[in-house]
């Protein structure tokens, strides 16, 4: 007998199940409010939909019921108290008894319908759309009752329902107890970033990521379409740009992009495109006019790092002082803004290097007049942003560099309607951006970069040719022993690292209101179709719960330990649904709750973060 923590907490509500036997179903992300009954299981029969005539709703219902009936899901990891162990020095556990869950054979009724009420069936899938829902399965009812303000809230209700209906072990589908859920996300921006510029990602694999997003209630796919290494995006305005795709088979046509956008929209996922400008520019652009680019023929590292022209090969930046730059970027932006319907468009803006602009005669003359790199960036802000607005009036997202780069931040006014994406220095930069009155998307590399910790990737690197630890005497970390091994943002970001990020810590209420949510990037220098799902999932699911219902209970205590079995189970559920997520632990840990914890003390995280 036990009270089982089921969910928390956006409204500071922390509810407990009050029934003799805790349920196995443990949906991720944990709902804000969930209350289970104690009168017994309900059989789930053939479900029919009763709701508004809406294709998104009908298709979502069809997907959910197909998953329910075909998977006949049995939870792979369930919550239970950690078992008793003999105290040190006896290494043998006090009990080897394994508790097997018994669902019982008696049910109290049969569910046959899903009634859905939607207040606004015409709401567009744009920033801030209402995603709240309620889900009620009452004792004695034959119907599952769902209410939502928009169809997108209803979709979230259906993905929750998928995780509530389970196989009782005999093949019969049940909901274990009557249940009442009230749910709404903490943040309007919840997503991942994929990068198809360094390595191509197929349409099939991108759709797989969208499936993972929808199942975990993430609602944004930030698509970093191109980079200096390749240009896979086919455009009518400049058809020769795809000469810099890796091959004719690694191209996104207009039809392909629209298909991906529509696939995502049907699942409540916004697709925000990014064309990184004016940095990270080489491939594609040089097919338009090489004269509007700087340093594309330089040696990127210069074999003397202080003089590097790019942080990775191959180098190139749009020449900010060349008028052709604004004609070309305006046309590219306009065509893509018409393909991607989201009201937000990411225009990049990170990692500008003055060394690159030393290869531009226009820039050299500019600097010789006493102007700085920040002054040059301000020229871009003052010319490019109004030019883009004139082509298609959207909200721009930019990397934080335009405001905070130590070497290149714009020296004048950056419009306050620009949304900034924070990727450096964690809490410090989030605080700095919001203190200046800007909206922010959290993507802090210290917590959320999913490509970190895999070592370096550039070749001909003498730093690996070290046979003996040069710091063996004092044990201090160095390149090959205990440090990053060439990964600038090492170490690897575990699901616990992501989930434990209190990214509004120290902010005023006014600043907190400017935080739009979080996006976990996966840069693709070492990522393609073969590994993309394993590197994103299920770690992105930890972010999903963090930005949906938070990581703390009503007492302010971290609930990371509670998430353990939930995310282990969710990984298995992702794989069952075709999302090839990586394992987080040996399967032993799924089957033996909390026996793989570092600490037997289950409240260790209640003491607060390590200083």
Image: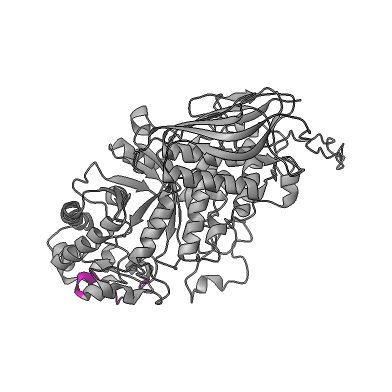
Bounds of the magenta segment: 291-302
Where does residue 460 sit, x and y in percent of width and height? 48, 77
Q: Which residue is drawn at 57% across and 29% down?
A: 557
- The answer to which of 270 and 489 lies nearer the viewer is 270
Q: Report which quarter residue 507 is drawn in.
A: top left
Colour approach in the figure: one colour
Q: In this view, does 466 lie above or below 143?
A: below
- The answer to which of 362 and 173 lies nearer the viewer is 173
Q: Is residue 41 above or below residue 418?
A: above
Q: In this view, does 333 lie to the left or right of 174?
A: left
Classified by dominant secondary structure, the portion drawn in magenta counts as: loop
Q: Which residue is drawn at 82% across and 36% down?
A: 85
Q: In this view, does 148 lie to the left or right of 603?
A: left
Q: Report which quarter residue 608 is drawn in.
A: top right
Is residue 170 at all visible to an observer of this figure?
A: yes
**Membership of 298 in magenta stretch:** yes
- The answer to which of 405 and 9 lies nearer the viewer is 9
Q: Which residue is drawn at 74% across and 24% down?
A: 20
- Which residue occupies the extreme left position in the image? 369
Where does residue 470 sit, x and y in percent of width and height? 59, 65
- The answer to which of 584 and 330 lies nearer the viewer is 330
Is residue 547 at all visible to an observer of this figure?
A: no
């Amino acid at each position: 007998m036990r009270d089982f923590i089921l969910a928390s907490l956006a409204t500071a509500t922390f509810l407990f199940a009050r029934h003799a036997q805790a349920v196995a179903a443990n949906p991720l992300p944990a709902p804000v409010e969930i209350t289970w009954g104690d009168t017994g299981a309900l059989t789930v029969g053939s479900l029919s939909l009763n709701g508004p005539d809406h294709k998104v709703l009908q298709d979502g219902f069809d997907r959910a019921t197909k998953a329910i009936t075909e998977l006949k899901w049995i939870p792979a990891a369930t919550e239970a108290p950690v078992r008793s162990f003999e105290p040190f020095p006896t290494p043998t556990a006090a009990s080897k008894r394994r508790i097997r869950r018994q669902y019982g054979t008696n049910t109290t009724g049969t569910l046959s319908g899903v009634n859905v009420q939607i207040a606004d069936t015409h709401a567009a899938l744009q920033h801030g759309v209402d995603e709240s829902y309620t889900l009620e399965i009452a004792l004695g009812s034959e119907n599952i009752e769902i209410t939502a303000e928009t169809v997108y809230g209803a979709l979230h209700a259906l993905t929750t329902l998928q995780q509530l209906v389970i196989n009782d072990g005999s093949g019969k589908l049940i909901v274990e107890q009557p249940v009442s859920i009230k749910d709404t996300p903490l943040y309007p921006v919840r997503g991942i970033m994929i990068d198809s510029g360094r390595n191509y990602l197929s349409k099939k694999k991108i759709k797989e990521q969208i499936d993972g997003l929808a199942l975990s209630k993430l609602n944004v796919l930030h698509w970093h379409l191109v980079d200096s290494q390749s240009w896979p995006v086919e455009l009518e305005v400049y058809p020769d740009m795809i000469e810099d795709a890796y091959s004719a088979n690694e191209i996104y046509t207009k039809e392909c992009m629209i298909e991906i956008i529509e696939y995502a929209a049907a699942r409540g996922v916004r697709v925000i495109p990014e064309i990184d400008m004016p940095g990270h520019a080489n491939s594609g652009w040089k097919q338009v006019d090489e004269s509007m680019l700087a340093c594309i023929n330089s040696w990127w590292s210069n074999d003397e790092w202080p003089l590097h022209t790019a942080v990775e090969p191959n180098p190139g930046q749009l020449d900010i002082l060349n008028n052709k730059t604004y004609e070309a970027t305006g046309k590219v932006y306009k065509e893509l803004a018409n393909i991607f319907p989201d009201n937000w468009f990411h225009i990049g803006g990170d990692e500008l290097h003055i060394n690159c602009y030393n290869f531009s005669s226009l820039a050299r003359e500019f600097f010789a007049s006493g102007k700085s790199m920040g002054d040059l960036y301000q020229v871009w802000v003052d010319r490019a942003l109004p030019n883009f607005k004139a082509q298609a009036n959207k909200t721009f997202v930019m990397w934080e560099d335009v405001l905070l780069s130590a070497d290149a931040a714009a020296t004048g006014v950056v419009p306050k309607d620009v949304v900034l994406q924070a990727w450096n220095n964690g809490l410090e930069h989030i605080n700095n951006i919001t203190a200046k009155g800007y909206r922010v998307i959290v993507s802090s590399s210290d917590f959320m970069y999913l490509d970190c910790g895999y070592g370096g990737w550039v070749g001909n690197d003498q730093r690996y040719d070290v046979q003996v630890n040069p710091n063996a005497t004092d044990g201090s970390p160095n390149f090959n022993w205990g440090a990053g091994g060439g990964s600038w943002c090492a170490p690897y970001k575990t699901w616990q690292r992501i989930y434990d990020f209190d990214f509004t810590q120290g902010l005023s209420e006014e600043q907190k209101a400017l935080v739009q949510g979080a996006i976990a990037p996966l840069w693709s220098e070492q990522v393609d179709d073969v590994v993309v799902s394993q590197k994103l999932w299920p770690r992105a699911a930890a972010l999903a719960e963090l930005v949906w219902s938070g990581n703390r209970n009503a007492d302010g205590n971290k609930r990371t330990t509670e998430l353990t079995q939930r995310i282990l189970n969710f990984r298995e559920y992702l794989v069952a649904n075709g999302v090839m997520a990586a394992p987080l632990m040996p399967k032993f840990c799924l089957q033996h709750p909390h026996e793989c914890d570092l600490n037997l003390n289950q409240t260790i995280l209640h003491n607060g973060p390590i200083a």
